[in-house]
Image (spheres, grey):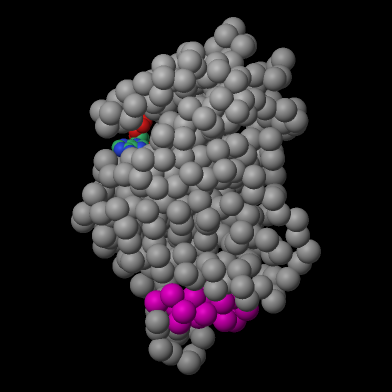
Amino acid sequence: MLNFNIQIPTRIRFGRGKIEDLGKEILNYGDKVLLVYGGGSIKRSGLYDQVVQIFQDNGITHVELSGVQPNPRISSVRQGVKLCKKHEVHLVLAVGGGSTIDCAKIIAAGAGYDGDPWDFFTRKAKIKYALPVGTVLTLAATGSEMNPSAVISNDDTKQKLGTGSPVLIPRFSILDPEYSFTVPPTQTAAGTVDIMSHIFEQYFSPTPGTFIQERLAEAMLKTCIHFGPIAIAQPGNYEARANLMWTSSLALNGLLSAGKLTDWATHDIEHEISAIYDVTHGLGLAILIPYWMQYILDEQTAPRLAEYARNVWEIEESEDIIAAQAGIKKTAEFFKSMNLASSLSEIGVESKHLAEIAQRATAKRTLGAFKKLEYQDVLNILQTAYGVVAP
Ligand code: NZQ
Ligand code: ZN
């Protein structure tokens, strides 16, 4: 295990009815809020009315930024920054999924910066200051509710880039699983895959001696495999939604990555795909993960992949390579069982873009840590995932 520092300052208020704490939480920071939300799911569910009522009851004034899109755009961030500066807001409140939260985080950073917020992604500027951010989560997936990261798309440059800073970590997050009852089946499945993918990116690591991190990761993977299908079949199942929601936060809050190198190659490739095609993040990951696992399987990686197969899928096989292959097959079958696509061509990716995606993903660096990937490796994975070459 490597040395590490960890600090997870988000106050989590988890469970039914926890929205009652929203007013008190906001007033810790001031009484002028920018409310950020997406395309209308919170209006349909009634959550919007509840939040606005809480503002009124607590003497909180607010301005709004609505219409944040999945794969949130820098143009929305710019609008939000303008509102913050004009109205001198004290806190940015995101009510929604990862896209809304990520947008809110960069708005909060942009509010204290004189230049264009895209500078945070091109590394022209570093995020040193941000307004406080709070969240009310409605979709279990990204872990953004408890972490320092944000991913934003730029339509002009066709880029989707990430950034992060400790000052972006939400000060509080209200996690009421009932708010995710209305998440549709495909989005529930995509969210489940995203959570699993975050766990994989940290579980598949070259760092030895991290027994505790691995066992925690396996428990989280089993939770997703058990409760993902239940939440799809029974959208109002509180236990399923609660377990998925808490796993989404735990999977990417620093707990699993403490003391080890992490991989992130699949994410890096997926972000290039959704930069061009605007696909749902978890959907792209569901396609890539089994092909990535298959591609990187060799004598060096087999023991960990076999450990995954045995501990998560209960495969009884003593030969590592064979156990690993069985685990990969189970993974692909599980994603398919949630009605997710299993090839890039199915989601409209065109073969003419595969080389460009591979080139962009590897333009600045070698990908991965568990297994390092160069341009040709990424292209090979994309070609099998597309359906050009058999895996
Ligand atoms: O926009 P609305 O109307 O709210 O609808 C959303 C959206 O269409 C809908 N939705 C959310 N909660 C709902 C609901 N529909 C019904 N009932 C509810 N309760 O779901 C759709 C997708 O929402 P989105 O926020 O885009 O999903 P998700 O949470 O999966 O976020 C994806 C974004 O986060 C980034 C992804 O790349 C992508 O841009 N990521 C952020 C990370 C982070 N900050 O740490 C890490 C991740 O790996 C990821 O890259
Ligand atoms: Zn993700």
Q: Residue 361 location, x and y as percent? A: 59, 46
Residue extending farthest left? 233
In the rendered image, the quadrant that contains the C terminus is bottom left
User: Does residue 246 sit above or below 323 in this rendering?
Assistant: above
Q: Is residue 139 above or below residue 157?
A: below
- At x 57% / y 67%, what residue is drawn? 203
Residue 63: x, y in percent? 48, 13
Q: Nearer the viewer, residue 142 or 354?
A: 142
Relative side of 242 to 106, left or right: left
Image quadrant of residue 30?
top right
Most distant residue in the right direction: 3
Residue furthest to the bottom in view is 318
Residue located 43% across and 31% down the image: 95
* Left or right for 332, reference 151: left
Q: Residue at x 63, y 76 (%)?
A: 211
Q: Quadrant of the N terminus?
A: bottom right
Q: Main secondary structure of the magenta part?
A: helix
Q: Is residue 162 magenta?
A: no
